[in-house]
Amino acid sequence: MELRHLRYFCIVAEELNFTCAAERLHMSQPPLSRQIKQLEQEVGAELFERSSRGLRLTPSGVFFQQHALQILEKVEVTIEATRHMARSKRALFGIGFVPSVFYGQLPILVRDLRRMDNVELSLAELTTVQQIQALKAGRIDMGFGRLRIDDPDVEQEILFDEPLIAALSSGHPLEGTTPTCEELARYPLILFPAKPRPSLADMVLGIFRRQGLKVEVVQEANEVQTALSLVASGIGITLVPEQVKRVQRDGITYVALADKSISSPVICSRRRGEKPSALMQEANTILDVLVENRRTGRYP
């Protein structure tokens, strides 16, 4: 399958007429009909209903059209961004991150890199597993996550261990306390992210499991903001990294845990054995300052 097949399909889907579509594509109708038939054979589904009254998209065709348009739009955006980067002679630097690390000092790293004239910054919200894949494929240059993953092509550096805290609904019985895990386990638990796994959700479950505690997982959410909304609704409690409390939300209160050793690492992943570019060296220098500020309690 080539991009031209997607373009042909989208034009036919828009016109619902092979003759009109062929005219727009500056080609004759029979080759266009053959291309669409070949596409259907490759996809393994009929995309059009053909009748004496004309063409109609099948349910599979509607689904395929939605995604084909997204692919073509992404290609156009990528081409234009590449042309822009080539004209500006700026270097592309990609950063992957899990949402729970973007409430602390990571935005400062992004801000400082964006101020550099020779940098075209690309940000991607990715799980730690996805970051490893993106690093190996060259789609990003640096990743920030929370899972330790053993891969010979990627090196991981633990920047610091971040305490976990409990997010409760306002007026919760544990508000104003420093609860133990045993006390937390008495209340319904909201986990995030729901998928893909493994993730912070598995780390949280492991905390209770190691203490022999059973918890009732009442809901799973893919995003930390969704989890907090569920907490504010009184559905349950959740554990979040400490930096999340810097974003205040109505109906939410945060409490530190009695066990101060309960934490989650913030990990930076880079390609192993690669000589750092000047841009990577600059990013590492900025990151070193931010990590030192975090470790010593000095926040900008």
Image (spheres, rainbow, N blue to C red):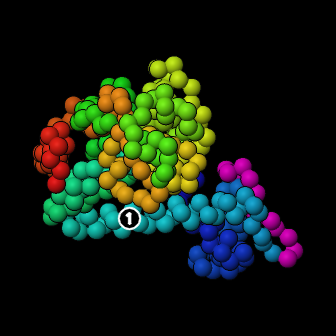
Residue 83 appears in the figure: yes
Instruction: Name above or below for residue 144 compared with residue 7.
Output: above
Residue 202 appears in the figure: no
Residue in the foreground of this view, choosing between 184 and 245: 184
| Image location of residue 4, percent across then percent down | 55, 63
- Residue at (21, 53) in percent of width and height: 109
| Image location of residue 108, percent across then percent down | 22, 55
Q: Is residue 92 magenta?
A: no
| Image location of residue 299, percent across then percent down | 18, 50
Instruction: Name above or below for residue 223 compared with residue 15.
Output: above
Highlighted range, magenta = 41-53
Q: Is residue 38 left or right of residue 236?
A: right
- Residue at (80, 65) in percent of width and height: 49
- Residue at (50, 47) in percent of width and height: 172
Q: Quadrant of the C terminus?
A: bottom left
Q: Tag 1, which secondary structure?
A: helix
| Image location of residue 65, percent across then percent down | 64, 64
Amino acid at dot 1: Ile
